[in-house]
Amino acid sequence: MNGDNTSKSKVMEDFLSISGLTKKDLVGLVDEATNYQKRFRKGERCFDELRSHSVVSLFYENSTRTRMSFERATKLLGGEFAYFDIASSSVAKGESLRDTAIVLEALGFSAVVVRHYSEGVPQQVARWLEIPVLNAGDGCHEHPSQAVGDLVTLAERFGSLEALKGMKVAFVGDVAHSRVARSVSLALSMFGATSIFVGPPEMIPAVTSVEIARNLDEVVADVDIAYMLRVQQERLLVRETLDVSSYIRRFQLNDLRARRMKKEAVIMHPGPMNVGVEVDSTVSKAIDLLAPAQVRNGVFARMSILSRLLGGAQGV
């Protein structure tokens, strides 16, 4: 599961990117996550795969869903989870990322979950450490565990991963800065789904293999999945000022546009949601908005990932 090609003498691999996985890998992770989901729904709360393990989060960016999801997953699997507080650590005194990571390994943690505002940092940490490293989001690069959770949600909604073949998925909004869009579109392509990027020119990556639309009205009636993205103001350059009223007029999924969608189409959002920008208040509460299911299934997906790295599951 290591997307980095550097050699490494470690018993267990890392979880760094969707691009480093195969379709078979993803099917295995989703199947295992679905199994955890079913057992949880039957009332099971104690899983033993990580009983002798401890996981630590090394987050240089704020997070609610991802960090708590990894924590919940670790504890459900019987492991211990520690939150490394950057603000109150020696990082504030100038300690380097490398030294911080090495300290965490020396403290005896079984794995490190890394989130960073720069691309490639989890991959670099994985080269430094012998213990498994999990990518919880790196800059505008990838967010692979989110993609696995979304596949679990879509398999649940449509009956199977095979049902995704031939579907059209519109990623709407700030695609260029979205690591979620990158990971999820890569994952969906393995199952035969086609992506469409919808947004203003400055928010669309320079790609030639994906259909581009400059107005949501062009595609909203034809897509099977509308994946709405938050405008990441924190990643925009100083010169990239957002005309909010123009953006809402062209790209917001409002009630009127939602009514034009296919009857069986679904709406997704990775969170946090800016109600009134990418979606209106009506759509944010719509039954077809899968965001709560995405959060729930994100826990089972991360249970699957952690189990494959540290537990008894074999052969991803």
Image: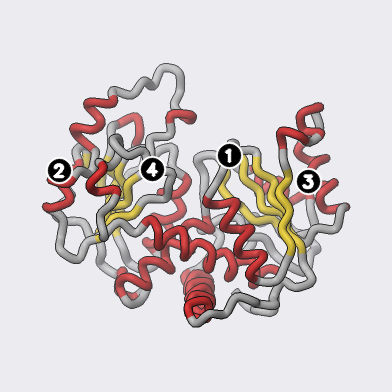
Q: Is residue 302 visible?
A: yes
What amino acid does circle 4 point to?
Answer: Met
Residue 141 numbered mark, or none: none
Mark nearer the N terminus (2 vs 3): 3
Crowding at dot 4, Cα within 10 Å, few <14 / some 14-19 / many 20+, comes out as some
Is label 4 in contact with label 3 (beta carbons under 8 Å)? no
Q: Distance between the residues labelled 2 and 1?
A: 33 Å
Give the number of the mark in front: 4 or 2.
4
Q: Check disc 4 and report the residue beneath it.
A: 273
Q: Residue at x 22, y 42 (%)?
A: 213
Crowding at dot 2, Cα within 10 Å, few <14 / some 14-19 / many 20+, comes out as some
Q: Check disc 2 and report the residue beneath it.
A: 217
Residue 169 position, x and y percent, is: 28, 56
**Residue situated furthest right in the rendering:** 106
What amino acid does circle 2 point to?
Answer: Asp
Residue 203 position, x and y percent, is: 35, 34
What amino acid does circle 3 point to?
Answer: Ala
Q: How far apart are marks 4 and 2 (CA)?
A: 21 Å
- The image quadrant of residue 20 is bottom right
Mark nearer the N terminus (1 vs 3): 1
- Answer above or below: position of 234 versus 220: above
Q: Which residue is drawn at 40% across and 62% down?
A: 293
Q: Distance between the residues labelled 4 and 1?
A: 15 Å
